[in-house]
Image: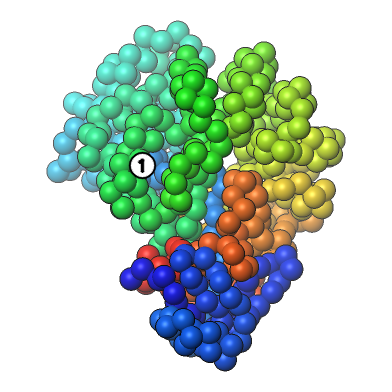
Amino acid sequence: MVCLKHAFINGNVYVSFRPVRRVEAFLVVDGKVAMLGSTEDILRTAGVLGAGVTDLGGRTVLPAFIDSHMHLDELGEYLNMLDLRGVRSIGELKEKLREFAEGRRGWLRGHGWDQELFEEKRWPTRWDLDEVVSDRPVMLSRVCLHAAVLNTRALEETGLIDWDSEDVIRDESGEPTGIVKEEAFSVAVRKFDEMIGEEEYAEYLLQAAEYALSKGVTTVGFVSVGERALRALSRLEAEGKLRLRVRAYLNPGEELEVLESLERLGIRRGFGGGMLRINGVKVLADGSLGARTAWLSGPYSDADTNGHPNVGKEWLEAVAKRVHNAGLQMAVHAIGDATMDMVLDVYESLGDVERAGHRIEHASIMRSDQIERAKHLGVRLSVQPHFVLTDWWVIERVGEERAKWVYPFKSIAKAGIPFGLGTDSPVEPLDPWETVYAAVTRGKYENLPLAALTGDEALGLEETLHAYTAGSAQVLMDEELGTLEEGKLADFIVVSTDPFEVDEKELRRIRVLETYVGGERVFKA
């Protein structure tokens, strides 16, 4: 039903989390919260307006979650590919691939493996995959989405077998191992994506959007958006099929052709409708800690490399200035602290970063001086707390001294830097309660060494829920979202349990029962 006028009564309704404010009931008119109050007051007004009424029966209502950084297209593809999360050996990976390949035609794709979990203590190779599938291309991406293993056929079909690049890993004899990283990985992804038809691709996006709604996420910051994704989303919105609010951050294009189009057309931040808007441009400035491609100011503790930037400082500054002058929001992926220095230098050259709303994505390693500098510049951050659980090996990777700078969420909050939470899905699970659990517990129940070393960087529940709602809205620069205050969009969820009434270990077990966008129910468990 379309809720032009609808009252929700007899509930435990959280209006906001900073400060925590609760009411019994609220009234929605034309998709926005029009009135808050007691059940008696809301019923009286509903009667005058002839509004419909839903009795919540004492259930808990929260503002809907806003994922500030995720990949909607890749999530849709992930929902239709081989799931390799948690695989404990290359042997298990091969068996799962064998089962997945049976009865399927064409190119094969999987995601989610992590060599740190493998009992063989090594990366998989093309020869491992060739033993299972050799007659068609196979690509299995690492959990970080910065590396993948390809079989021989895939290396040949993508042309990467002949690439002379550090992103195509070779063995001691000079043979490609099948492992590709960063730019080479991006080439492989593009080739595989070309095998997906337009209708199938749009269906993947729609599946991802509906999946997000089922998890209580009603708005996403969709980063690294290509022209194909934008076309498909525009069509879905025009057809009335897109029920998820999407704020798009576009790839600038290999030759900056997308950025040039935005400039030429005069498209500024917020261009679009209620469901789909263009917010800005996203640049991938370095890699990941898992693949050792994030750029550090000193060598990794477990390898003779500092990682490397994906772009030069002069190039990044030139692009950032064009984005800034075009009235668009800049979002830059920065995981290593050397990359963070470069991005902060670039932002400092722009002036009035706070008004423009420029963002830094991940901020995985952030020194205290960088936190202070980001605060001074008015930078906004999008962070991913579930990385804490996934990167359980991080102290070995960067060493104990630098590990004190890893995922410094509490320090960011104390500094007063605007920050929102995301999942980088499908890198991490889209389920917000997994993210909430990770932010609040920081791996202490998993006995992670990082929890013992940096337990004081855990967030409180109020801080976490605020960051996942109003904080993410601030990062997306969307003033109509994030709380259920009067005048805000009526995006909310009904959950199985009041999160403030359960032990923190139980947070990840909370379930979304219903999801509403603009007061209209779009999901029911």
Residue in the image at 40% along x and 16% along y: 176
- 329 above or below 295? below
Pointer 1 local density, CA inside 10 Å: few below 14, some 14–19, many at least 20 = many
Given residues 125 and 274, the one toward you in this image is: 274
The quarter of the picture where residue 352 lies is top right
Q: Position of residue 128 (x, y in %)?
A: 33, 30
| Residue found at the very far front of the displayed protein | 48
- 509 above or below 72? below
Residue 231 visible in the displayed image: yes
Residue 130 visible in the displayed image: no
Given residues 485 and 337, the one toward you in this image is: 485
- 327 above or below 9? above
Q: Position of residue 122 (x, y in %)?
A: 48, 32
Q: Total label count? A: 1
Residue in the image at 61% along x and 34% along y: 329
* Residue placed under numbered mark 1 in the picture: 233
- 473 above or below 402? below
| Residue found at the very far bottom of the displayed protein | 40
**Residue flagged by tag 1: what amino acid is it?**
Leu
Q: Position of residue 300 (x, y in %)?
A: 69, 28
Residue in the image at 44% along x and 34% along y: 225
Q: Quadrant of the N terminus?
A: bottom left
- The answer to whether 267 appears left or right of 90 in the picture is right
Residue in the image at 62% along x and 82% along y: 37
Q: Position of residue 62 (x, y in %)?
A: 56, 70
